[in-house]
Amino acid sequence: MARELSWSPEALEDVEQIAAYIERDSVWYAQAVVSRFMAAAESMREFPERGRVVPELRDESVRECFVYSYRLIYKIASVKTLILAVVHGHRILEPLLPRIASEL
C-alpha cells in the first residue's frame, strides 16, 4: 500500500535553493536534478525503508537516500513519509539537526 508523501516547507526551500544554484550554470541540469529529487521522493511511497538510517541521528524512522551528491532526508511514519531536508552530501549535518528534530 502506498503511503502519503509530503514535503516540509524547509525541504522545498532546500530544493529551490539547490536549483537556483545549479541554474546559474545550466537550466537543463537544474531541472534534471529537481526531477530526480521528486522521483526519489515518490519512490518513498512504496519503498520507504530502502534508504539508510541517518548516521547522525541513529533513529530507524529517519532515513536518507542519495540523489547525485545530495542527501534526501525523510521520516517514515505508519502511513506517511515526510521529506525533511535535501542537503549536499559534503555539508555537515549538525547545524541542521535542530531543524530536522523539530519535525520529528
Image (cartoon, grey):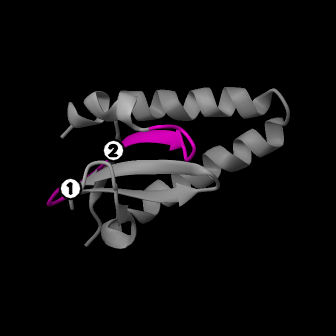
Cα–Cα gap, marks 1 and 2: 19 Å
Tell me which corner region of the image, top left, top right, bottom left or bottom right, holds residue 31: top right
Q: Find residue 49 and report its horizontal and vertical position in percent.
A: 31, 69
Q: Find residue 84 and report its horizontal and vertical position in percent.
A: 35, 40
In the picture, the disc for residue 59 is 1
Marks 1,2: beta carbons within 8 A = no
In magenta, the rendered stretch is 77-92
Q: Kindly tell me whether residue 46 is visible in this rendering.
A: no
In the picture, the disc for residue 6 is 2
Amino acid type of the residue that numbered disc 2 sits on in the rendered structure:
Ser
Amino acid type of the residue that numbered disc 1 sits on in the rendered structure:
Asp
Considering only vertical position in the picture, is 13 above or below 90? above
Tell me which corner region of the image, top left, top right, bottom left or bottom right, holds residue 29: top right
Considering only vertical position in the picture, is 83 above or below 48? above
Closer to the eye: label 1 or 2 = 1
**Is residue 86 left or right of 51 when viewed as pictured?**
right
